[in-house]
Amino acid sequence: MRLRNIWIAGLAAGTVLLAAGPVKLLNVSYDPTRELYTQVNAAFAKQWKAKSGAEVQISQSHGGSGKQARSVLDGLPADVVTLALAYDIDVLAEKGHLLPANWQSRLPNNSTPYTSTIVFLVRKGNPKHIKDWDDLVRQGVSVITPNPKSSGGARWSYLAAWGYALKKNNGDDNKAREFVTKLYKNVPVLDSGARGSTTTFAQRGIGDVLLSWENEAYLALNELGRDKVEVVTPSLSILAEPPVAVVDKVASKHGTTEVAKAYLEFLYSDEGQEIAAKNYYRPQSAKVAAKYAANFPKLGLFTIGELFGGWQKAQKRHFDDGGVFDKIYTPGS
Amino acid sequence: MSIRKDPVWVQWSLTALAMLALGGFIVLPLVAVFVQAFEKGWAAYVTAVADPNTLSAIRLSLLAVGIAVPLNLVFGVAAAWVITKFQFRGRDLLVSLIDIPFGVSPVISGLIFILLFGANGWFGQWLADHDVRIVFAVPGIVLATVFVTFPFVARELIPLMESQGTEEEEAALVLGASAWQMFFRVTLPNIKWGLFYGVVLCTARALGEFGAVSVVSGHIRGETNTLPLHVEILYNEYNYSGAFAVASILSAIAVITLVLKKWISHEH
Amino acid sequence: MAAGTFRKANILPGFGPALGYTVFYLSLIVLIPLSAVFLKSVSSTWAHFVETVTAPKVLAAYRLSFGASFVAGLVSSVVGFLIAWVLVRYEFPGKALADALVDLPFALPTAVAGIALTSLYTENGWLGRYLIPMGIKVAFTPLGVVIALTFIGLPFVVRSVQPVLADADRELEEAATSLGATRVQVFTKVIAPMVGPSLLTGFAMAFARALGEYGSVIFISGNLPMKTEIAPLLIVTKLEQYDYAGATAIAVVMLVTSFVLLLGINMFQRRTRRYMEADEA
């Protein structure tokens, strides 16, 4: 990979030197990655300049994952996309033909340079003694999570809960559904996005537990104060894989294909992995993971492919209109 | 000025009631904004406002307003003239059509332009072939702003001009004034306050519009973020005081325009 | 609308060009773009359209959106008229400031308004801490939706009524009083007919605007399906599934309803005005 990196960088340097002025890249990403990519962009620009002598200027755009994917589909000129779910990039391939259908096999680890999972954020001292998923369906426990219909993170949370119940009940689908239904009975407010939920929980003081991305939970811990909230890692959760991809059609039009590829491969480099780990994303590199092991408590992880047959199926069964999530809220069904 | 006055107790109780309502519905949320804006002190406030991304958002917002308001101003006067000074078939229909943008959800107001100019929209292919960018660029933001603030000036003028009737204009014409003389010497002075309210509302609304612009902006930092979008970004970065600081600029602009109005009315 | 019989000779200039420009600009900015929404909504089958807009979740959202907007429009009308009246008729300290503050809901980005309102009414908020112990829950209930929509709609009423009230001929009231009319009579016979049309306009605009409002409401409503989910939120979730036809179908129903309402109010106004003119003649 190293060699390939250098080869690509060399080639890209050649292309870049022909063009005048700094190269511009647009990275269209989802909500919680702002801090991560601000740091990645600075580090990559420095490395790229050292390697190729050319300036690269990377613009960021953040929003809900689905909304961002839709914008790219409708013409937002993203050279690279770094979204919350593979489903959203699949759509770009399928409906927009902006990149080939096999995009996920073009980079290591299913094009996922870092992973995350779903954990709990609770009030300081954990007054309701919330240790694991079972505690969330107890009476009198109020759970905050965004609306899975409009938030990518909330979909991961929903599937994490479902997967936990499925594993605990030896794959009994009805039990899992019962569990998730009970869980959502404890949800007093469904914000439209992940950050909205964090605010509801932390600023407004509503709810006993917030279901959150692991990286969001630690960020919130630092931003909002360790004296107010603490993180609880459940015994079992879902392996959330936010993938990245070059948008071929846009990048080739801009002539940025090589630098875009180098940018994404930078995420897999030691430096990129360290930045990810420092921002509480679980790195893929074993070496970096070992160095930051203290940041990431051990827990059982299952993948969406394993329990749900991939995003396409999960989306259709659970989150599309008339799906299981809708039925939870429809009386008499 | 007034010839006959309501009794003092009526004046006072009505005023108290109105101010209470104004306080509860409008001032309290506003105070909440300002309190949070200054939560971390002046220094944090200035940092948030002087940030290059904030400044670029201010520039973009002013540009959108600078285009949208004059366009809608000219339209508003023309439309109100036709509607209030003449009888014609389909007048009610026309008035109602002008109101439409009020009833369109901001989400849809943005979506409209995606359906027209997006990559898969009616003109998408043509625009891509000619390398013209409308949505996810400045033209789209301006268009969405024009659409959202479309009815304001017309809507302010119509009830006012309706209550004024046509006698004064007719008299001017009979006395030999030309059409433009009549307009500038009679009509315009009569409607100047309504016009001014309309422009103020249009400006304020154009500055504050969030939903529609959010759909067509693409949220590229420092490039296609307007002030309200920038507020959302800061808020989402847990920079609550920064978010409210930028929001307070918007409120301040509204107050300044209104103070300006007072000043102008004293000049006359 | 039998305008022909009522038409009197009109010597005012500019009808042709002004009408032409109005219709041209209206078509360019509003009608042609909006037709894209209508065409999109029927881009799938009629059955899909009907199925979308009659789903229980959508009906519940319509009920909330229309109901809350209507109530908010009424509250705005009463409160807005009162504020306009006080601002036009009375002198009091701080009047200029009060006048300026009326427009703030326009200037505040709707999302900021939503956040600010929510922070007031939750358990640890300035108002919530007193209201919630009394059993009045505002945040995350339909009442919260009404409050957010009233905040959005109030300036429409004030700013519609204010210029008409300021322009109103005080001598008429004088004459009525000197002829022995009571205060109530002056109000119902002189002031109300004069201000009525603009108040109705204000209500209609506040209602229409409230119906589509998204940014401020989603923060305070709680977004629970079947309970506090507003129709514009459903549009957003449809888009999330790339169901453009479904999203525009929901929008078209709201659009047509508010258009019919506005048209009705405009025609009603026309008629009352005509009666008044006939009375005068």
Image: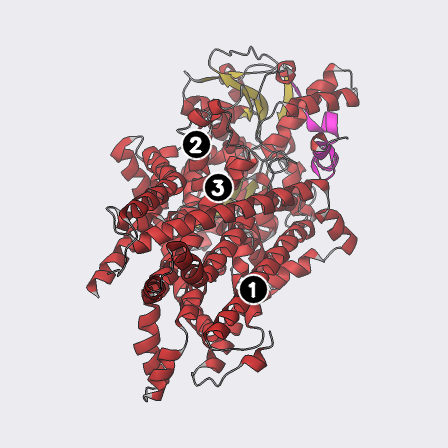
Magenta region: which residues? A301-327
Residue C148 badge: 3
Residue at horizontal 44%, vertical 81%?
C14
Residue type at tag 1: Phe
Residue at horizontal 60%, vertical 73%?
C1
Residue at the spot of label 1: C268
Residue type at tag 3: Ala
Q: In this view, does A266 lie above or below C48?
A: above
Residue at the spot of label 2: C119
Residue at horizontal 39%, vertical 71%?
B164
List x then y, in percent, for residue A66. 60, 41
The chosen color scheme is secondary structure
Helix, strand or loop status at disc 3: helix
Circle 1/circle 2 CB separation < 8 Å: no
Residue type at tag 2: Ser
Q: What type of secondary structure mainly makes up the magenta span?
A: helix
Q: Do labels 3 and 2 share a chain?
A: yes
Mark 1 — on which chain does it sit?
C
Mark 3 to mark 2 CA distance (whole Å)? 12 Å
Pick whichever of labels 3 and 2 is earlier in the sequence.
Answer: 2
In the foreground, A312 or A263: A312
List x then y, in percent, for residue A25. 48, 47
Quadrant occupied by the C terminus of chain A: top right
C52 sits left or right of A141 in the view: right
